[in-house]
Image: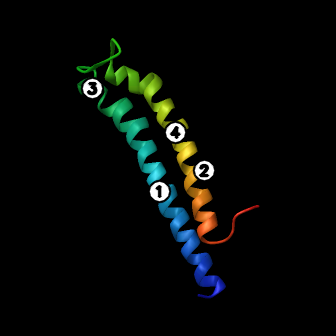
Amino acid sequence: MSLNEKAAEYWKANVRLLMLCLVIWFVVGYVLSIMLVGPLNNISLGGYPLGFWFAQQGSIYVFVALIFFYASRMNKLDRQFDVHED
């Protein structure tokens, strides 16, 4: 595999991971927190309506988890393509 092919595969995997994170971010931040807040408010989580919880706290937890997930996956990707830092 040439250097250009390896770089193209690395970039493709990187973009795929980024798109996955962005889709999750959109679903949690927009769909669950704004569009579906009414139906989700019929469900209670810890005494609070689920729609309210997603809008106020749940989305933040998911966003922080996404940061750690992305960093972990990128470390694996960097090692797989031998572009990691020692």
Residue 74 in the figure: left or right of residue 33: right
Toward the top, the furthest residue is: 47
Residue indicated by mark 2 = 71
Q: Which residue is mark 1?
A: 19
Dot placed on the residue nearer the N-terminal end, 3 or 4: 3
**Which image quadrant is residue 14 in?**
bottom right
Kind of residue at disc 4:
Ala
Relative to 1, say whether 20 is above or below: above
Quick one: label 1 or label 4, which is nearer the N terminus? 1
Q: Name the amino acid type tagged 3.
A: Leu
- In the image, 30 versus 57, the foreground residue is 57
**Circle 3 Cα neighbour tier, 10 Å, few/some/many (<14 / 14–19 / ≥20):** some
Q: Position of residue 36 (x, y in %)?
A: 29, 31
Contact between marks 2 and 4 (CB within 8 A): the answer is no
The residue that label 3 is drawn on is 40
Q: CA distance from mark 1 to mark 4?
A: 16 Å
Instruction: Give the CA separation, mark 3 to mark 1.
Output: 26 Å
Spatial CA span between label 2 and label 1 = 14 Å
